[in-house]
Amino acid sequence: MKQFDYVRPATVAEAVAAAAQPGAVYLAAGTNLLDLMKGGVSRPDRLVDVTHLDGLDQIERLADGGVRIGALVSNADLAHDADFAKAYPAVAEALLSGASAQLRNAATVGGNLLQRTRCAYFYDTASRCNKREVGSGCDARDGENRTHAVLGWSENCIATHPSDFCVPLVALDAIVEIEGRSGRREIALDDLHRLPGDTPERESALEPGDLIVAVRLPPAARGFAAHARYLKVRDRTSYAFAVVSAAAALRIENGKIAEARLALGGVAAKPWRARAAEDMLRDVPPTVDAFQEAASRALADAKPSGDNAFKIELARRIVVRALSLAAAGTPVRIPALPASPFASMSGAIHARA
Amino acid sequence: MPELNLTSAPAHLRHGSNIGQPLTRRDGVLKVKGQATYAADNHPPGMLFAVMAVSSIARGRVTSLDVAAAKRHPGVIDVMTPDHKPELAIDPEIKTNPFVFRMEVLQSNEVRYANQPIAVVIAETLEAATEGAALLAPHYETLPALIGLDAGESFVPPVVGVGNPTENHRGDVEAELASAEKRIDAVYETPPQYHNAMEPHAIVAAWNGDNLQIDMPTQGLMLSLARVAELFGIAHDKIHIRSPFLGGGFGSKGLMAGPPVLGIMAAKLVGKPVKLVLRREQMYGPVGHRAPTRQRLRIGTDGEGRLTALEHHARTVSSTFDDFYEPAADASHTLYAAPAIRTSHDAVRVNTGTPLFMRAPGEATGSIALESAIDEMAWACGVDPLAFRLKNYAEVEPITGKPFSSKALRACYEQGAARFGWAKRPLQPRQMRDDAGLLVGWGMGTATFPALMFQAEARAVLRRDGSGAMEIGAHDMGQGAWTALAQIAADELGLDIDRVEFKAGSSDLPDAGIAGGSAHTATAGAAIHSAGAAVIAKLADLATSDEKSPLFGAGNAGVIGRDGRLIRRDDESRGESYSEILARAGVAEIEARGTGAPNPAAMEEYAMHAHGAVFAEVKVDPELGQVRVTRMVGAFAAGRIVNPRMVQSQLFGGMIWGLSFALHEEAITDRRTGRIMNANLGEYHIPVNADVPPLDVITVDEHDPHVNALGIKGVGEIGITGSAGAVANAVWHATGVRVRRFPIRIEELLT
């Protein structure tokens, strides 16, 4: 493979300085980056290994009731943190529905946010890809695109963001803490990933050298713990990316939805927050009719980018099901097949057609 | 094989006898401890690393390679290209026999499929060779690629599979269809699939003068050796191939392919040992695959649900430069009795590597279509699918009229159905739900695979120290040859298995033929049987002609070798140990050879097939369309079972592959470029643990006196047949949706 420099900075400041150089990239667990490098998709000049930085692997309960997750916490450690899973069950369920046990043990929170699309044309270096090579074109647009985007795509790029973890996070208003050349700043996770538009190569709001150091969930996120689910439809029972997924979280008071949160995965270049659906669900009883209306609002702007029109109808159904599952209540334990339609559905209020 | 000698086989593995016992894998501990030496584990001194550069176009010509850039990269030793390579002794385009396939070994700049090797970079490290290959930055003259089942004009190939007639018929299909009471006419499609053995194709090649040492996984040591000998123009005895373990073969390692030849060429070019291992994505091209098919079945029945006509036509593809035709329609020859049967094939040529045998070639593709169609026909007749199959049970092989050498399929149906609980199945689809509201469906399929035999030789030895040896260049692909063949060897030598040195997996041993066609245990077993009998006969000659032996004069009565002793057949109290006989004769050891081969007379008289019945339960989310198999029961009759534990594992593996065929596997080919877009194990889906339900395998007793001396039919491939159709039929029964394009996808079930 291409030769590269490997540096292991001692502090976050050193890391930011080292990674601000052109051709430098951060290395955490490398569960995505190393594959990209082996495939010649990514050819960095310098890897800045952040795995030895102190203080980034903690899960901290904040005084205000929120939680702060260090960027180097592994997916497995976070999902298996009992307090975390109890407070944010949809996040834990999403984490456990992703990848394989081995990958979850290695993969980190920060890396999960910044994983690249799984579009086959991005990985195939002989194909044209505007993400990989600016202005080269998009071979996915008329190619094998059954799993591609149905929301927020452009003629320049129809790729999706593959993360499960990000879907409930964005629904719960997660905040990303970033250390950069001009110090620390924070942005909403919803603002981290960009839609492709005319610049699909710009996937995030990060600037050169920017290092995600933590993800924070605000105090309000805890309020959904009793009614929060993640549902992921995939082509096999485990170790597959979502065809479509949804995170649904409800605050139910006096038989009505006080507040709803809804986000979709596998449908766009970012985790897709469905605010119009959330607004519609405020102050209404949690019924299948309401959920169907919410689903149709969530997908109102969807259009197929290829042989994937089915994903729009599938997404509507997933939204209805995820909301129904959330309304039925968070299970005491995360199911053995997390986020799967084959997790026990007993207690779900969906109609048995 | 020093790893598997007399002393390292723990005595406790023995359960009291040999054939028929569920011995644990004799090589299991080695594998668990990482001590089993696979080809790529070898590192001879001075070894260099070779990496292939492969084509990103499917058709055209390489116009330039930046060899200078590659050579400038630190650690790169040389770059092998069509202009810079050792000459071969013969043109690799020449087919010297039907088991020789054309290969791409840099004989020209022409590109005929994506992932074709176009250069080889040799370097001091794997990393340097890999980067050197990337730096070649090839340029191409690209021609429009031929892709898919409708590419170009179709034609009727001269033969399909391995020399099978392209067309077969019996009776008048058109007339029977015209007068049939009920008819179906359905088209099924199966995708290209790749073997994806866990161990990629790999070679470590070392020349020493004109001697050639090769470490390489192969399912056919002597076929590979012969091919290497003719390509490099060297005598057979100058070549030694070691292949003690294969990390799966499934047909893709049966015949010599281009990449290992490139490894040998690279070693010759640089004058040092070279290792060449394919990257996962490089296995999607030069090492074979299962061709896609489109199969049309037309079936007719009379008013009682008896088949009157069965027509099965299969369209498939071959490469633009060689011929292998998936014999999918032949699946309809053996299972269901019909007065009129017609099977036929046609094909188109596409820009792909040449298709090859892949676990149950023809049977697997044909079975899912036939079993789906039979299910559709049963439904059209309003008959339970099992009752329909029983009603059309073939008492003789339908296409030939020959009697079966044995056929316990009825027992398979009965035992499998009973274990599964089939009798409670509602006839109508979409009738069953579980407590969670998931749709539940039950489906079944009939399994079948021919009982084949090839040719093999073995050498048996009995030693004065009371031990013995059996030598045969057999192949363990994970199926358990190290164990099952050693069990046969022990019985044939009349020794405890702990006292038998069983040698296999090396080309300097007697030719074991090819580990393919589910025939390896039968073929190698027959050779071992003969060799064992021959050496016991020699020992008996020594004893019965020696006045000092208690067996003197027992020649007419005969003797038996058992537990290291020869005993009189008519008086088991009289006998002596092998050691005593050999000691008195003053010899350290005696040896004999034996061969195994098919019996042409029996083959002429009988149709020889293994059979089975597979029952599957699936659950389907009624709104979301996701499918999960929740139960499978397979009952198989495959003659004599040498090792029930190995056989069960083989059948499990086949059933899982059938599940995979129905629901998961597909090489997604870009319709414009012919490149495979999911050439990795993350995206080329096979079942993961969570997809595999509890599997229940029943092996039905079957005694077959005709197939071969040991009565073995083989179990390597039959498990995939029947299973794929059973899962597909269960999906229909759950949902009422008949999906005819495989694998079955979520979107097909979003009704």
Image (cartoon, helix red, strand yellow):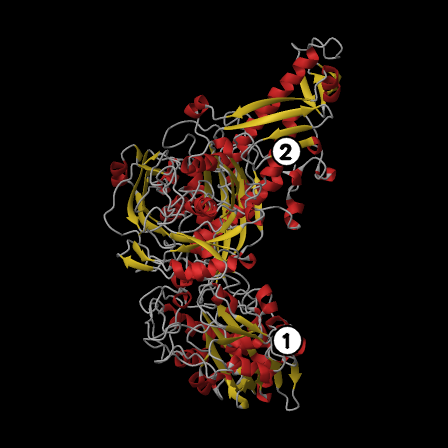
Q: Please rate how many residues cluster around mark 2, counting C-alpha atoms within 10 Å: few if below 14, some from 14 to 19, many from 20.
A: many
Question: Label 1, on which residue?
Answer: A52
Q: Which residue is mark 2?
A: B502
Q: Quadrant of the C terminus of chain B?
A: bottom left
The quarter of the picture where the N terminus of chain B appears is top right
Viewer-closest of A111 and B179: A111
Which image quadrant for residue B364? top left
In the displayed structure image, the side of residue B236 where residue A219 appears, left or right: right
Of residues A54 and B610, the one drawn nearer to the viewer in this rendering: A54
Vertical placement of residue B694 versus B603, above or below: below
State whether residue A176 is above or below residue B441: below
Question: Which subunit holds the residue at mark 2?
Answer: B
Quadrant of residue A223 within the rendered picture:
bottom right
Residue sitting at the far left: B153
Q: Position of residue B555 (x, y in %)?
A: 66, 10
Kindly identify the amino acid type of the residue bearing the numbered disc 1.
His
Vertically, is B306 above or below A223? above
Mark 1 chain: A
Where residue B279 appears, as percent x and y from the top left, is: 47, 55
